Image (spheres, grey):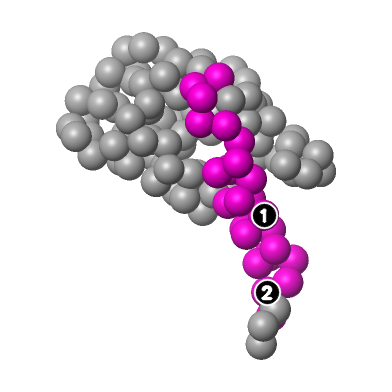
Amino acid sequence: INDEYMDLIPTDEILDKLAHVIGTVSFQLGIELGLPITSIDIIQYNNGRDLVAQCKDILFQWREDQRVRPTIRVLVQALVNIDRGAKCLEEIIKNRWCEEIHPTRGS
């Protein structure tokens, strides 16, 4: 991931798209992002078997947490630590900022 993006805070769109590719490791992701276990348990309980909703809630709660600045860099490290790697996030970011920088591309 380009270093110029690493200290940015991920947008709603990025977190939404990322939630679809996390899969069954939402609990581990929450732990890596520093969320309290009780918060992760509540998220899992509230969302039942909906893994995407669990991941979204975990990602959005992490971004709102005031203890740590929720940057792309922190997210990349958490993804690497749960063996998801950063490639999925890199694709989402690349597509997101390419659209933002070149919104009329292909027109």
The label on residue 64 is none
Residue on which the image places disc 2 = 103
Does the residue at mark 1 contact the one at mark 2 (Cβ under 8 Å)? no
User: What residue span does the magenta drawing correspond to?
Assistant: 81-104
- Magenta span main SS: helix
* x then y, percent, for residue 2: 78, 44
Image side of residue 4 versus residue 51, left or right: right
Residue 78 image point, x, y percent = 56, 24
- Comparing marks 1 and 2, which lies closer to the viewer? 1
At label 1, the amino acid type is Lys
For residue 39, which quarter of the picture? top left
> In the rendered view of the protein, which quadrant contains the C terminus?
bottom right
Residue ID for mark 1: 94
Residue at 68% of width from left, 74% of height from top?
103
The answer for how far apart the CA atoms under marks 1 and 2 are is 13 Å
Q: Which of 93 and 47 is in front in this view?
A: 93
Give yes or no for residue 88 being in the magenta stretch: yes
Quick one: SS at disc 1?
A: helix
Which callout, 1 or 2, points at the residue further toward the start of the chain?
1
- What is the crowding at mark 2: few (fewer than 14 residues within 10 Å), some, or many (at least 20)? few
Q: Amino acid type of disc 2? A: Pro
